[in-house]
Image: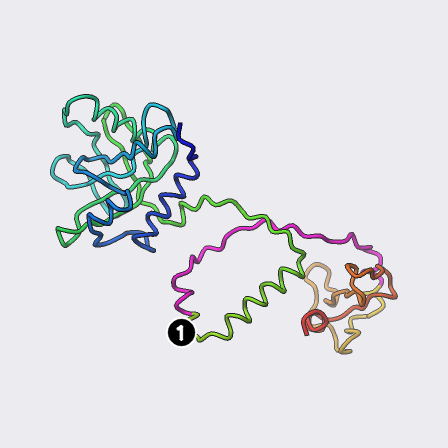
Amino acid sequence: MNNLSIKQEIERRRRLFNAITYVDIAVGVTAGQLRELGIYSGAAGVWVNTALTKGIVSDNAGIAVSIMHTGKDYSDDFSDQGINYDFPATKRNGSHDQNEMQALKNCYEAKIPLFVISKSANKKLRDVHIGLIENFDNEQNKAYIKFVSLKELDVSEPQLVRDTQAKYINKFDALVNKSQVTTSAKRQKRILAADHKPKKVLRYIEDYARNPDVVAEALYLAKGICEACHQPAPFMKKSNGEPYLEVHHIKPLSQGGEDSLENVQAICPNCHRKMHFG
């Protein structure tokens, strides 16, 4: 029994695709690269790495890793969006064709992506898409594989971060400061190479249950004037038309400060930021 889970296999294939491209199609890949990475091996239409994928879905068959589209042996309908792939019917000895069909079916049922390999403009090289089988038709002996982007294959779970909000902001500010000491050219290079879809995190925040009466009374007593810079509130709240000020604890609650009128100020957002980060 293989110890890899479906999720691990999806992530493994995502990393393999990243090894040959950072966009949604790899162009001009050598056959040697495909063999070395285990994306494709051999001349058959369907490549199944049985040793690695057998047991992920069932004990009896592996999962299709890739298909080779040549446009010669089958009447495949190939486009920029996907491919209508005919099931193998080579009449080879044994149960090769049946095993490959089952491997394709396992890929479909587990929603695991597979690689679609086609000839590049240079006939000695290959282009590679990654796709998901959207339709598996036993009666028509066809499968439709829709090409997808790497972003659609992100199976990572949100990371649990056990930081207070203040610690998170301090850590992020430190990373910004570190970035600022490098050159703009280096930053832009990293930005281009980075995934533009931010990772999700579950942030564990330790907080305090504050007394709403203390907040309301502090705002009432301030009468719309910041108690730090003594300027009017910068804008009015949409919810009730009241001047927007924030109630700041002079001695932080995390340091033993009381949640009382004597320990708070109603101040503008600018002064509030200055109190914490100035």
Q: Which residue is drawn at the image coordinates 24% and 24% (left, top)?
A: 98
Q: Is residue 215 above or below residue 45?
A: below
- Image location (x, y in percent) of residue 134: 33, 35
Instruction: Name the side, left or right, on which 169 lies relative to 266.
Output: left
- The percent coordinates of residue 232 (x first, y second) are 74, 75
What residue is pinned by disc 1?
185
Q: Is residue 74 left or right of residue 200?
A: left
Rendered-image quadrant of the N terminus: top left
Report the quarter where the C terminus lies: bottom right
Query: Is 205 included in the stretch rendered in magenta?
Result: yes
Label count reads 1
Residue extent of the magenta highlight:
188-217
37 to the left or right of 177: left
Residue 2 percent across, percent down from the top left? 39, 31
Q: Amino acid at mark 1?
A: Ala
Relative height, residue 224 to residue 115 (above, below): below
Label 1 element class:
helix
Percent x, y of residue 255: 79, 61
> Which quarter of the picture shows residue 258?
bottom right
The residue lying toward the viewer, choosing from 272 and 221, is 272
